[in-house]
Amino acid sequence: MSASPVTDAVAERLDAFLLSMRSRSTEYGPDAELFLGAAASTLRGGKRLRARFAHAGWLAASGGREPDTALWGLGAALEIFQSAALVHDDLIDNSDTRRGRPASHRALEAAHREAGWHGDAEAFGRSAAVLLGDLLVAWSDDLLEETLDGHPHAAATRAEYARMRRDVTVGQMLDITEESAWSVNPPDSLLPRALRVAALKSARYSVEQPILLGATLAGAGDRLLEHLRAFGHPVGMAFQLRDDVLGVFGDPLVTGKPAGDDLREGKRTALIAIAREALPADPRAHLDSRIGDPDLTATDVAELQQLIRSTGAAEKVEQMIADYSDAAVAALDDADLNDEARQALGALAEAAVARSA
């Protein structure tokens, strides 16, 4: 996605917030600068997708009003929360890279070594990344509260934001649980379990809730929020299913992560559930035995990719993506929206689903 006035405005708000945070942190001493710098580093790059969906939600509910500064604060808070989630996600998944750069725990590990500090650099990196994610969550809340101070729709926006935080945290826990719990659950339950993880961990907070937050900030009524939810949920599901496909088949030069990273991490996604159900007993057992092995070689990954392709699972997931996209279009058709909001939502939905990174 190219730069836009939305991303520029959010970037400006982020820069101002970071400057404020760092100016208040001089009392922490020089060692804290490593920590604060790592936090700022996580906010570089990215598609600003959540901020852009929040803007589209605003357009849907604002009646043509120009965005006020609160919208850019909300968008920036969402981006900080996204960074927190990615720091913790990379730590949980033992991912070495993010957006083509070292993941935060690896960057902090490297900083420990470069400084010549005593002790286990890897343990320091992991411990510091836990705290880094916590700091980013706190910063997200700080900025949200600054943004909502005195705003007429503060209470409703704050409640939706709180729900988003709860949903994604529980979804992350269900995601790591499924990497173990799949083995004791009925095979026909694995796909609905994977879709529940997708909804909570990603679909809601990536698409649905940013739209609702932007609309709520603009004063949306219940009926409009219902239509926007009916649009945002299927787009979010399609977004996550595309992520699942890229996690197995994505080009590392485009995604910024190694090929087949989801296979090494043991992700029990909808793609894997569908493939597993289609396989005979022996190949299924082979797939189960290899998923989650962090030492899979490029040859191993290619062999598993071919095994998954042979089941037709990738095609079935693509059909699910198309079905979710159709449901989103239908929801927009039924909504009372101005042309600008309709076009913004449709364009963002297409970009979120038809992507390679």
Image (cartoon, rainbow, N blue to C red):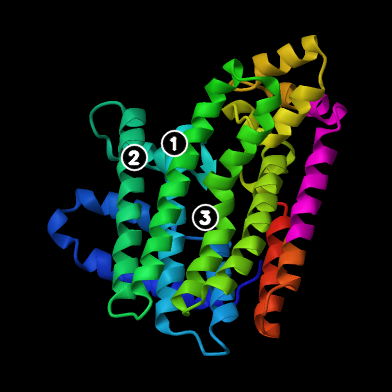
The spot of residue 272 in percent (x, y) is 71, 30
The residue positioned 57% from the left and 39% from the top of the image is: 197
The spot of residue 81 in percent (x, y) is 42, 56
Residue 100 visible, this angle:
no
Q: Are marks 3 and 2 in contact (CB under 8 Å)?
A: no
Q: Which mark is residue 91?
A: 1
Q: Are marks 1 and 2 in contact (CB under 8 Å)?
A: yes
The residue positioned 46% from the left and 69% from the top of the image is: 75
Q: Which mark is residue 205?
A: 3
**Disc nearer the start of the sequence (3/2):** 2
Most distant residue in the front direction:
223
Give the residue type that dot 1 points to: Leu
> Mark 2 sits on what residue?
130
- Real-space Cα separation, disc 1 to disc 3, in angstroms: 20 Å
Label 3 crowd (10 A; few <14 / some 14-19 / many >=20): many
The residue positioned 51% from the left and 36% from the top of the image is: 96
- Mark 3: which secondary structure? helix
The spot of residue 340 in percent (x, y) is 67, 83
- Real-space Cα separation, disc 1 to disc 2, in angstroms: 8 Å
